[in-house]
């Protein structure tokens, strides 16, 4: 006899477990629903079906092997055939080549996307998702995509499944209430959530219109960065990544739609039940979230992480630390120290360096940097870089503080005094692969075509005595001229 589902939980009372990143966890919504001592018994408790979701090949080394066993009322295979979604979503890209995208070394910046009332154009998370740039191929299992979303409608009667890669979602405005096969998750701005490849999930908008950022990685998964000389502690801690507890529904749902992203294209299949019918689960492949600087909000997710729990390291004597010191999660390549994609944050912190230009320095980088601003003012851009906006500085393209920031910094009389950077949270997706940009992102009315002018005002401060030569030529050594 089927056991009735538990009473619905209030959004602020969702329960979750600590240590959701990489650790093996287990949860059951009904006592006794999780098999003991084996994964796939002849008859599962309560008449459930056993189903394994693998995030790595079966033969991956044990330390990197990811999989979770799901015990569900009906298996996910019970659906009609997939068909291309109509109308097609033409702003999602999974192959980044000359036929789909363009290359440009120009510094790019976008203003925030306007949020449209639902009455004018209803868009859920799937329809409101669009690709900005990326590199590589989802089919070849190597590369990444950077998307943004602007949604004004909850997903109703459908669930999304990304077969291409992991989603790292960064809300900027409006909370996301995400239901997944492992449980529920509430993610406000200032937190992030990672939905691993293959999980089915639905996004509700409890606050109405919402927007934010999404990075997607192909062929690998996010992990904590190595700490090296920092030692055993600091940056992000595994215990601060939270996973949900099991939650399920068993209602008959005729015409329920599964939307599957596959090779950057969308396909749909229908079934007569909710995909969120998992009564129990155990494993180390689960969604997780990170909570940030919004104190007092109770959040929940498959797994989450509060960014305010990030322990930043910084300069305590002179010079500005490289931004890599603020890496929260990394998706490494097979080259040591080279990332397919890093997620880096710039949190509130104390600045104490002596005789140092404290904002980020001017630089050209072999990595490519996509930045977003969740709230506040970014320390290197006094004007123009707005919450909900974005910028892209590609491989070896110069960038750094704008004119206003530079002039204000070097003219400060208290430049050596400790100061606290507060009321701001910016982030960066950084990759070793050169991004190609979608045409609609270049043509977007939100693109700031005057971005380059923020540096045009930088003037020469070079000072020297015009009456003296800057160098003195010495006669060549006779032996060296032979």
Image (cartoon, rainbow, N blue to C red):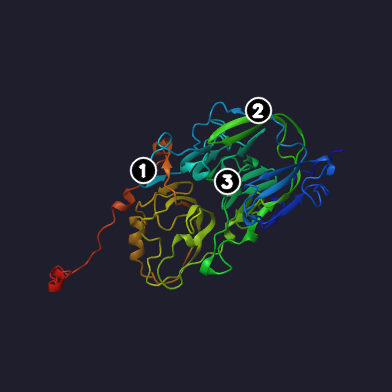
For image coordinates 64% across by 54% down, the residue present is: 297
Give residue 2's position: percent from left, percent from top: 84, 38
Instruction: State whether residue 293 appears in this view.
Output: no
The image quarter containing residue 255 is top right
* Residue receiving disc 3: 166
Q: Which callout, 2 or 1, points to the residue nearer the camera?
A: 2
Give residue 307's position: percent from left, percent from top: 57, 57
CA–CA distance in space, label 1 to label 3: 26 Å
Vertical relation: 262 (above or below) 326: above
In this picture, residue 455 sits left or right of residue 117: left
Going from the N terminus, do you reach mark 2 or mark 3 first?
2
Vertical relation: 390 (above or below) 404: above
Label 3's element? strand
Give residue 134's position: percent from left, percent from top: 46, 43
Q: Number of callouts in the render?
A: 3
* Residue receiving disc 1: 104
């Amino acid at each position: 006899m089927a056991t009735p589902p538990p009473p619905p939980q209030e959004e602020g009372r969702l329960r979750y477990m600590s240590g959701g990143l990489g650790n093996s966890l287990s949860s059951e919504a009904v006592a006794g629903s999780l098999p003991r001592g084996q994964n796939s018994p002849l008859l599962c408790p309560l008449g459930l079906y056993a189903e394994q979701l693998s995030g790595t090949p079966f033969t991956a080394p044990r330390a990197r092997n990811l999989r979770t066993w799901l015990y569900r009322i009906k298996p996910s295979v019970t659906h009609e055939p997939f068909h291309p979604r109509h109308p097609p979503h033409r702003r999602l890209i999974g192959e980044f080549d000359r036929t789909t995208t363009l290359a440009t070394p120009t510094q790019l910046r976008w203003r925030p996307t306007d949020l449209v009332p639902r009455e004018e154009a209803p868009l859920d998370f799937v329809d409101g998702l669009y690709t900005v740039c990326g590199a590589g191929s989802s089919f070849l299992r190597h590369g990444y995509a950077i998307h943004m979303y602007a949604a004004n409608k909850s997903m109703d009667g459908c669930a999304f499944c990304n077969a291409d890669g992991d989603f790292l979602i960064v809300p900027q405005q409006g909370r996301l209430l995400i239901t997944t096969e492992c449980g529920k998750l509430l993610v406000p701005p200032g937190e992030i959530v990672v939905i691993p490849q293959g999980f089915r999930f639905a996004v509700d908008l409890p606050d109405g219109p919402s927007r934010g950022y999404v990075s997607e990685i192909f062929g690998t998964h996010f992990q904590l960065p190595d700490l090296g000389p920092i030692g055993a502690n600091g940056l992000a801690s595994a215990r601060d990544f939270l996973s949900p507890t099991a939650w399920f529904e068993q209602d008959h749902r005729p015409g329920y739609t599964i939307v599957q992203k596959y090779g950057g294209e969308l396909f749909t299949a229908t079934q007569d039940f909710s995909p969120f019918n998992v009564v129990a689960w155990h494993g180390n492949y689960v969604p997780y979230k990170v909570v940030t600087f919004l104190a007092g909000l109770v959040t929940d997710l498959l797994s989450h992480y509060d960014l305010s729990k990030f322990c930043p390291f910084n300069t305590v004597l002179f010079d500005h630390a490289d931004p890599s010191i603020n890496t929260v999660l990394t998706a490494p390549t097979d080259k040591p120290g080279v990332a397919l994609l890093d997620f880096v944050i710039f949190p509130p912190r104390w600045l104490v360096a002596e005789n140092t230009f404290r904002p980020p320095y001017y630089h050209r980088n072999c990595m490519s940097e996509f930045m977003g601003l969740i709230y506040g003012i970014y320390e290197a851009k006094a004007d123009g870089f707005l919450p909900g906006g974005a910028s892209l500085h590609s491989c070896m393209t110069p960038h750094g503080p704008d004119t206003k920031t530079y002039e204000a910094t070097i003219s400060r009389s208290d430049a050596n005094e400790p100061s606290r950077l507060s009321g701001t949270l910016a982030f960066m997706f950084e990759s070793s692969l050169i991004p190609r940009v979608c045409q609609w992102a270049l043509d977007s009315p939100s693109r700031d075509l005057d971005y380059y002018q923020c540096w045009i005002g930088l003037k020469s401060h070079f000072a020297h005595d015009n009456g003296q030569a800057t160098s003195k030529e010495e006669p060549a050594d006779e032996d060296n001229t032979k």
